[in-house]
Image: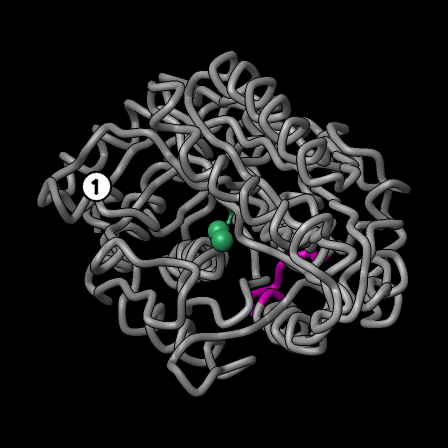
């Protein structure tokens, strides 16, 4: 068979994804595999079993990032790397992240089936804690590996029960000995579901993002004065939840106010003591702002902080703001993006040049290696939800594009 006619085994890819989806399966048809949870460990164990079965050299670093290396023919050549993440959102979907890890696993299985050797090594990767939902920030494993985040700072990040990343990494037995430190990578490809409505709306099968929007994460802490709700008059109250409610609406109104292509969201809120007959004295909520235009987001944030300050002063609710995490917008390597589009065309798939509104480890990776992503449509544009879905034939098509992208890069000397 000529190399150009090579295709992945779509049935095997589906079976692999279905097997994985049993780990942390939720009643609503999704999965819950929070970073460094028992379910994450179970899925990691299965992934490593599959890496061993195809004879890859398995390495685990001090961030719990898992690498599976397939040797190349050439001596001393840097690998082509591909992967994504195994962790999920709470009540998340069966495709986010895991498609990219199982997709490249299927690529390597296909190369093995056909006895194809490549010049360069191929390294499969599962990055730890991409989601950032249990431990913020997101993309923690790739962030430390690429020296954009400090390892010990990430180790100290706590979940809502006070358990730290470092403790949980050790508990599940995935704190490896290898330093989490980048090595030269010839090209990085990340295969992922789109997680938005664009491909479906455009009627296109393969998405080739030109890059990823910037992500800003903030944590806001508002203080009030607790009191018995009955006898305490409305006048003169310092109600932390009411102050937070006003602030949250300001976040929602921000994109319309500043214009440009921006989204802003409050997704997490904790109210204390959270009793129906106590005036709340503490609220913690998160803010997520994204755009292709970093400066717009920075200016908008400065604006928003002023609004927060005004609300806090009027309601006599002191405010504490943590600027938790910022990643600039990330343009990918044009040559590789064009390759994704070109290969999609050669395989007879329609394609679309676009922007990724979701964050991915490819964001950090593109700062240290030529990087591109392959997207396939999300049905109804839904993701981070249990009903997240992508057609099996689309999963197969994306894996075929990934296969040929990796083959081309792994042939370059
Ligand atoms: C990652 O899942 C993100 O927040 O986009
Ligand atoms: Mn993802
Ligand atoms: Mn996600």
Residue 23 seen in this snapshot = yes
At a point 49% along the width and 72% down the height, the residue shown is 91
Q: Is residue 257 left or right of residue 227?
A: left
Q: How many marks?
A: 1
Quarter occupied by residue 334: top left
Residue 76 at what x, y percent from top left?
A: 68, 28
Residue 82 at what x, y percent from top left?
A: 51, 44
Q: State whether residue 358 is above or below residue 382.
A: above
Q: Is residue 104 left or right of residue 398?
A: right
**Residue designated by label 1:** 198
| Nearest to the observer: residue 309 or residue 116 | 309
Check if residue 395 falls in the magenta segment: no
Colour pattern:
one colour
Tell me where the magenta segment starts and ends, as one range: 51-58
At a point 47% along the width and 42% down the height, the residue shown is 249
As helix, strand or loop, the secondary structure at mark 1 comes to helix
Whether disc 1's CB lies below 8 Å from ligand 1 is answered no
At a point 85% along the width and 40% down the height, the residue shown is 151
Quarter occupied by residue 412: top left
Residue 135 at what x, y percent from top left?
A: 72, 54
Outermost bottom residue: 27
Q: Is residue 88 left or right of residue 255?
A: right
Q: Residues within 10 Å of mark 1 (few under 14, many from 20)?
A: some
| Nearest to the observer: residue 145 or residue 335 | 145
At a point 69% along the width and 55% down the height, the residue shown is 66
Residue 68 seen in this snapshot = no
Residue 78 at what x, y percent from top left?
A: 62, 29
Q: State whether residue 313 is above or below residue 23.
A: above
Q: Is residue 26 left or right of residue 139?
A: left
């Amino acid at each position: 068979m000529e190399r150009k006619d090579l295709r992945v085994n779509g049935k095997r890819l589906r079976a692999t994804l279905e097997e994985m989806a049993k780990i942390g399966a939720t009643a609503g048809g999704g999965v819950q595999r929070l970073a460094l949870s028992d379910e994450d460990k179970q899925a990691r164990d299965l992934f490593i079993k599959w890496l061993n079965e195809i004879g890859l050299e398995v390495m685990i670093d001090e961030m719990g990032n898992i690498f599976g290396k397939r040797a190349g023919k050439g001596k001393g050549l840097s690998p082509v790397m591909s992967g994504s993440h195994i962790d999920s959102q709470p009540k998340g979907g069966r495709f986010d992240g895991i498609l990219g890890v199982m997709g490249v696993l299927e690529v390597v299985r296909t190369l093995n089936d056909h006895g194809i050797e490549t010049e360069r090594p191929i390294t499969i990767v599962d990055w730890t804690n991409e989601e950032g939902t249990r431990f913020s920030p997101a993309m923690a494993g790739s962030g430390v590996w690429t020296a954009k985040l400090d390892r010990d700072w990430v180790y100290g990040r706590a979940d809502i029960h006070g358990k730290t990343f470092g403790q949980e990494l050790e508990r599940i037995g995935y704190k490896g000995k290898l330093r989490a430190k980048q090595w030269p990578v010839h090209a990085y490809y990340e295969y992922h579901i789109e997680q938005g409505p664009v491909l479906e709306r455009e009627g296109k099968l393969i998405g080739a993002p030109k890059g990823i929007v910037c992500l800003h994460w903030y944590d806001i802490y508002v203080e009030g004065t607790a009191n018995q709700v009955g006898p305490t008059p409305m006048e003169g109250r310092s109600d932390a939840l009411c102050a937070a409610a006003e602030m949250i609406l300001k976040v929602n109104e921000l994109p319309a106010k500043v214009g440009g292509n921006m989204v802003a969201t409050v997704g997490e809120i904790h109210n204390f003591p959270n009793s129906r007959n106590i005036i709340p004295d503490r609220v913690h909520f998160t803010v997520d702002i994204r755009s292709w235009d970093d400066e717009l987001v920075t200016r908008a944030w400065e604006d928003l902080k002023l609004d927060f300050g005004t609300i806090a002063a009027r309601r006599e609710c002191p405010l504490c703001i943590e600027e938790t995490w910022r990643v600039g917008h990330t343009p990918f390597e044009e040559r590789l993006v064009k390759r994704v589009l070109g290969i999609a065309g050669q395989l007879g798939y329609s394609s679309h040049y676009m922007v990724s509104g979701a964050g991915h480890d490819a964001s950090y990776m593109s700062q240290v290696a030529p990087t591109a992503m392959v997207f396939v449509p999300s049905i109804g544009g839904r993701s981070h939800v249990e009903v997240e879905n992508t057609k099996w034939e689309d999963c197969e098509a994306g894996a075929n594009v990934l296969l040929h992208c990796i083959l081309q890069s792994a042939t370059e000397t």
